[in-house]
């Protein structure tokens, strides 16, 4: 029997639903992080007494830096999910870009934006050494 070269339209639609769910959650988390950064809730050191202001400003700066890093990671994740949806539209979703073989469904369920199979990822790592 010939090896499958792509997922069926039904399988692709299953992955589309999974990705859309993850995308909705990721977008909500990103929006929350962004609103925290822009101080949309109005809870900042400006509403504390001057005695605590110096301590609060240092902690607030660290917190904002961490939140900015998290927001950036979330934005990148969202972009990867959107790219996966494009691959579904193009019917190239789930094909390893190194080996050309199908990425196992189990891997795609865990990492729906994956573009490498484990075999492809290992080959890529070996070539970097």
Image (tube, grey):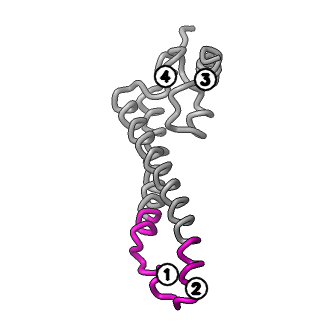
**Marker disc for residue 52:** 2
Which is more foreground, mark 4 or mark 2?
2
| Residue nearest the viewer, comparing 20 with 82 | 82
Dot 3: what SS? Answer: helix
* Structural crowding at the residue carrying mark 3, measured as other residues with C-alpha within 10 Å and reported as few (<14), some (14–19) or many (≥20): some
Distance from label 4 to label 3 (Cα)?
A: 13 Å
The mark nearer the N terminus, 2 or 1, is 1
Question: Which badge, 1 or 4, comes first in the chain's sequence?
Answer: 1
According to the image, label 3 marks what residue?
A: 121
Q: Which residue is mark 4?
A: 95
Mark 1 and mark 2 in contact (Cβ < 8 Å)? yes
Q: Which mark is residue 82?
A: none
Please name the predominant secondary structure of the magenta segment in the image.
helix
Residue carrying label 1: 45
* Residues at discs 4 and 3 in contact (Cβ within 8 Å): no
Look at the image and give the residue range highlighted in magenta: 32-59
């Amino acid at each position: 029997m010939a090896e499958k070269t792509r997922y069926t339209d039904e399988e692709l639609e299953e992955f589309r639903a999974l990705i859309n769910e993850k995308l909705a959650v990721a977008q909500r988390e990103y929006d929350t992080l962004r609103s925290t950064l822009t101080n949309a809730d109005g809870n900042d050191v400006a509403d504390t007494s001057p005695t605590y202001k110096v301590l609060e400003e240092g902690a607030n700066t660290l917190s904002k830096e961490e939140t900015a890093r998290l927001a950036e990671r979330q934005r990148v994740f969202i972009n990867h999910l959107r790219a996966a949806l494009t691959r579904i539209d193009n019917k190239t979703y789930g094909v390893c870009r190194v080996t050309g073989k199908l990425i196992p469904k189990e891997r795609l369920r865990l990492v729906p934006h994956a573009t490498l199979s484990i075999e492809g990822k290992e080959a890529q790592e070996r070539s970097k050494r």
